[in-house]
Amino acid sequence: MIADLVQHLQLFVEGLPAVVQFLGVALVAAIPFVESYFGSAIGVLAGLPVPLALTAAVLGNTATMLLMVFGASAVRERALANREPVEQSPRRQRIGRMLDRFGVPVVSLAGQTVLPSQIVSGTMVSLGARRNHVIGWQVVSIILWGAIFAALAYAGASVLG
């Protein structure tokens, strides 16, 4: 049953222009909680070559992560200019504790197992982590998670036939 669904999806996607296939995966990967990992898997299962699916998913996820980082950075700069104390939500406190304990690299790599990269990266920047440091590690994390899930999807598609 699942093999039939994957086969029908692949046939549908094959009929689309390559640009539409690429943009479709990029748009799906831009959605929080879908991100590069599920985006790349969807692209592979839809019949795109692994490098193309991974590239599209990484670009889509990175684009929305960058929007969040630059937005959070701008908000932080404005808030610090006014210096009004703001009470932090439990989620923000949790990410702050993780950031203090493990640093940007670990939070970037492991944070996507708990929350979307967009939320994790925006929160780290709003808590005071260096913007470019967060961007660099988030890109590494997005590529790594996307590659892992693309490989799993490719292996799964190979098993399904």
Image (cartoon, rainbow, N blue to C red):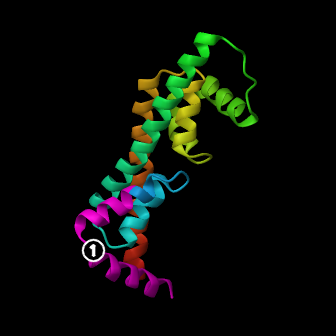
Residue 78 position in % (x across, y down): 56, 18
Res 111 quadrant in image: top right
Magenta range? 1-26
Q: Residue 44, how many percent across, how many down?
A: 36, 67
Q: Which residue is mark 1?
A: 16
Q: Which is the main secondary structure of the residues drawn in magenta?
A: helix
Tell whether 13 sits left or right of 141. left
State left or right for residue 2 relative to residue 132: right
Q: Position of residue 155 (x, y in %)?
A: 40, 70
Instruction: Name the amino acid type tagged 1.
Output: Leu
Residue 161 appearing in the image:
no
Q: Residue at x 27, y 77 (%)?
A: 14
Q: Is residue 32 left or right of residue 39?
A: right
Q: 115 and 74: which one is in front?
A: 74
On screen, 88 above or below 32? above
Taking the spot 57% from the left edge, 37% from the top edge, the residue there is: 120
